[in-house]
Amino acid sequence: MSSESWAQKVNLLTADELNQRLSQGKDTVYIVNLWATWCQPCVKELPHFEKLQKKFAAEPLKVLLISLDFRSKLESEVKPFVTRMKLTNEVFLMNEKDQQSFIEKIDDDWTGTIPATLIVNAAKKHRQLITNELTYNELLYIYHINKQ
Amino acid sequence: MKRLIMIGMLLGMFQVIAQTKGYQPGSVVPNFSLKDVNNKPVSLNDYKTAKGYIVVFTCNTCPIAQAYEDRIIALHEQYAAKGFPVIAINPNDPEVSKGDSFKAMQERAASKKYPFAYLFDPGQIITKQFGAERTPHIYLLSKTIDGNQVAYIGAIDNDTENTNPDKKKYLDEAIQALLIGDSPKITLTKAVGCSVKYKK
């Protein structure tokens, strides 16, 4: 695969579009990581999300990586970053003008700090936001308790 | 399984730490003193004629803080004479975030000609008292007979990238309300920002 093809995969996504997709997930466990290229702890934990999706490729798990970088940085920073990091999960850029409104659509208690990770299991009506930097083991644990 | 339970307990602990709250709208903020980039101590009480303060937790290195930098300067230029000066505090530990050292603060303040005080918070004591979570994080204080009361916490506006002409200017609206003796309608907003870099 050429490096070009990674970078093509960063699409724009609104909070409503995200919630729509999550609500239709049935028994799929969605793990949605909110990150940005300028957020050092986010960059540090991204490989854990890659590793998790690869390990459970056969299970109903879907990792989505949603960048909160500026819309104007999509071509100049986000796409090159995705290529450089060889990210294989689906990557999006949050396409919202009003941060106040999309923060609340993600989670009422969220103040907007990243990294933040949303775990959704629509069939079980689980929805939880974690606003800590996660280790791989913590991520593994979160996946296990949410798929039960 | 034991291991999973232990990880779960650790996770619970992290969340308790993350939820530790500082000042809320209505809280009274005691006077504090920190040194500015000229090594001069600055305290709230030094501003004798102030009607309040725009306390901004901000730093050199965060792209979001940088995006708001000119707006923070403009806020001071617009409101200091009306009684609401900006007091900027760098909340980051300089060992964790090297670009936020005292020397780097001096350089930034000089190159951008900050018209407001830019304060260093050794040990992050004031940052923790406020409960600042990110940069930039605004605490608008109003001088009342009960002390310096928090009137508004959150973002300057809802448009970090500064491309939306219809942006909501939360902080402006809150200051305007205080200037005519009202209470701000919106007292708390949320925003994306760089998390405060705490000492490890």
Image (tube, rainbow, N blue to C red):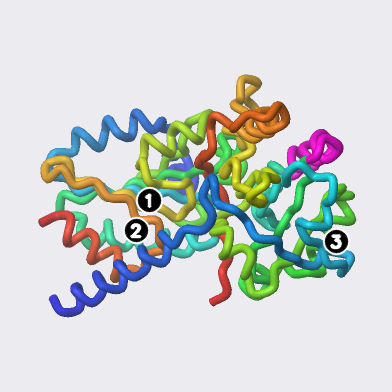
Note whether residue A38 is visible. Answer: no
Q: Return the residue at label 1.
A: A33
Element type at mark 1: strand
Element type at mark 3: helix
What residue lies at 67% left-to-right and 45% top-to-bottom?
A: B144
Residues marked 1 and 3, same chain? no
Residue placed most toward the observer, B67 or A93: B67
CA–CA distance in space, label 3 to label 2:
38 Å
Q: Return the residue at label 3.
A: B107
**Label 1 amino acid?**
Asn
What residue lies at 45% left-to-right and 55% top-to-bottom?
A: A115
**Label 3 amino acid?**
Glu
- Vertical side of B77 occupied by B33: above or below: below
x, y percent for residue B61: 69, 57
Q: Return the residue at label 2.
A: A49
Which label lies toward us, 1 or 2? 1
First-in-chain label (1 vs 2): 1
B3 relative to B149 in the view: left or right? left
| Quarter of the image where one finds residue B7 | bottom left
Q: Which residues are magenta?
A: B69-83
Q: Chain for mark 2?
A: A
Contact flag, marks 1 and 3 (Cβ < 8 Å) = no
Which label lies toward us, 3 or 2? 3
B104 relative to A135 in the view: left or right? right
CA–CA distance in space, label 1 to label 2:
8 Å
- Vertical side of A43 occupied by A123: above or below: above
Residue placed most toward the observer, B120 or B109: B120
Q: Residues within 10 Å of mark 3 (few under 14, many from 20)?
A: some
- Vertical side of A95 occupied by B145: above or below: below
Q: Residue furthest bottom?
A: B2
Contact flag, marks 1 and 2 (Cβ < 8 Å) = yes
